[in-house]
Amino acid sequence: MVVDQNYLKMDWDSKHLKKIKSSWLKHFLYASYFNFLALLIFITGLIHSILPWIFTFTPYKLAKKIVDGTEKQFGSNFKKRN
């Protein structure tokens, strides 16, 4: 089995804000919001792993909200980088 370890590399782009056409404040607010959702994914996912009948699809729905929000906000510029 081949394991892709590219995710371990530092992801550095000094022109990131310019490329996504965003201000520092706007980026900060969106990133904070998405990080808060990620924290909720962790909490609800942990609870669901212990009590499977609680938060049945909540972690998935929250993760989808992050993906959809990122694609909506940054559109084709985001998709080109991946």
Image (cartoon, grey):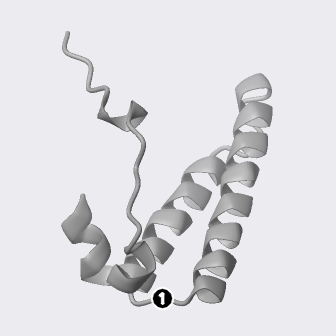
Residue 38, percent from left and from top: 66, 53
Q: Residue at x 41, y 55 (%)?
A: 12
Q: Determine whether 71 is above or below 50 in the image.
A: below
Q: Is residue 50 left or right of residue 3?
A: right
Residue 11, percent from left and from top: 40, 50
In the rendered image, which quarter is residue 1 located in?
Answer: top left
Q: Is residue 19 left or right of residue 44?
A: left
Residue 8, percent from left and from top: 41, 31
Q: Determine whether 39 is above or below 37 in the image.
A: above
Number of dots carrying numbers: 1
Which of the two residues, 5 or 79, is positioned nearer the viewer here? Answer: 5
Q: Residue at x 45, y 73 (%)?
A: 70
Residue 39, percent from left and from top: 74, 50
Q: Determine whether 2 is above or below 54 in the image.
A: above
Q: Residue at x 62, y 69 (%)?
A: 31
Disc 1, SS: loop
| Quadrant where the C terminus is found in the figure | bottom left
Q: Residues within 10 Å of mark 1 (few under 14, many from 20)?
A: some
Which residue is denoted by mark 1 in the rendering? 22
In the rendered image, which quarter is residue 14 located in?
Answer: bottom left
Q: Residue at x 31, y 26 (%)?
A: 5
Which of the two residues, 82 or 57, is positioned nearer the viewer here? Answer: 82
Which of the two residues, 81 or 10, is positioned nearer the viewer here? Answer: 10
Q: Amino acid at mark 1?
A: Ser
Which of the two residues, 6 or 58, is positioned nearer the viewer here? Answer: 6
Identify the residue at the far front of this view: 14
Q: Is residue 49 left or right of residue 23?
A: right
